[in-house]
Amino acid sequence: MTLWLVFALMTAAAIFAVLLPLGLRGRQQIEGSEASVYKDQLAEVDRDRAAGLIAAPEAEAARVEISRRLLAAADQEHGRPAMQSNPRLRRSTAILALVGIPAVSLAIYLPQGSPQLPDFPLAARNHAPEGQPINSLVAQVEDHLAKDPTDGRGWSVLAPVLLRLGRFDDAVRAYRNSITYSGETAGARADLGEAIVAAAGGVVTDDAKTQFKRALALKADEPRASYFLGLAAEQDGRKTDAASIWRAMLQKAPANAPWRPVVQQALARVGGGLGPALSDQTMRAAQNMTAANRDAMIHTMVARLAGQLKQNGNDVQGWLRLVRAYMVMGDRAKAKSALADARQAVAKDPARLKQLNEGLKNLGLNG
């Protein structure tokens, strides 16, 4: 009811804004007109001449010029149609405004709107309208692309939708066309490779490998390309190579990378664990040392890592390397102590704590 009252007040204000000028009687604006100004000037010239302020020739010249302007102004005013007040016309206009404006407004609003209809949540607004299912919208885009096959933007929009719909072959074609007409990027090549893998039932084919390698050539840290090349190595039976690829991804990735759990699970699947506590270069150098020197070097580097983690306790991968190093060294007590320190360091960060716990699953430590 309050809403209708507000609407009524707004309508009334609009109507009175229209009627107010019509309710005023038309007046001839004599005193404000141009002719009246010139008449006042003539009278002023006569007063100045009588007072001796100007000479007779100058007064006569001024009078002639002002008279000429007065005649011109009078002719212009006589040429305009007279503004006459018509009471019947004003009443008709008022009735039309009072009745017509609300009637037309209601006639337009009632079929279209409903003041009692609740608001739609944002998610509901983003859905395709009823009667327009996603397949129908896709068909419309495909019709557009059939008429304009060089629309790279259209192909790039259509391709991921086709992939989600399970139309893998069509998605591959759409991704190829997107690259052809919009240019290649690392993301676009990775998208194409992923679609090829989906179309092949999860097998990383040679064509898919080519796309992923091209993606890495354009952007060395493209995660999907690295992951699928690791998957290709696993499928080819090269589990060591797969583990090396995935381990390198985890070492370089930020702690909050959303794909970390997937890569960690893949690494665990091929028996890669969490990777060595020391780099491959360091391990190769250690092979040429005596046992005593090698142990001393490893202990020194592990101690350095432990010191770094005291300064930066948010490095989850660092904690995992430290715990594993202690396990390799046979010092289970220090491994448990490092684990306790790690959990304390990331206790206030649920994402890092979850990442830490997932990384510890294969170490045989229960805390």
Image (spheres, grey):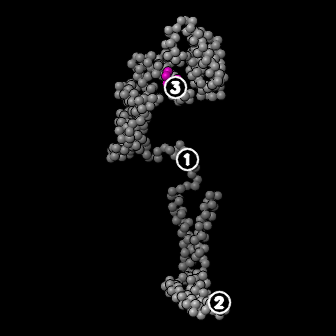
**Which label is found at residue 252?**
3
In the picture of the structure, the residue carrying the numbered disc 2 is: 53
Residue at the location (61% across, 87% down)? 40
Residue in view at x 62 percent, y 90 percent: 54
| Callout 3 secondary element | helix
3 or 1: mark nearer the eye: 3
* Residue type pointed to by label 1: Phe
As for residue 100 lying within the magenta part, the answer is no
x then y, percent, for residue 310: 65, 22
The circle drawn on residue 120 is 1
Range of the magenta residues?
Answer: 247-253
Does the magenta stretch mainly form a helix, a strand or a loop?
helix
User: Considering the numbered disc 1 on the image, is that residue within a helix, a strand or a loop?
Assistant: loop
Q: CA distance from mark 2 to mark 3?
A: 99 Å
Nearest to viewer (mark 1 / mark 2): 2
Mark yes or no: residue 290 visible: yes
Of the image marks 3 and 1, the number of the one nearer the N terminus: 1
- Residue 74 seen in render: no
| Amino acid, disc 3 | Lys
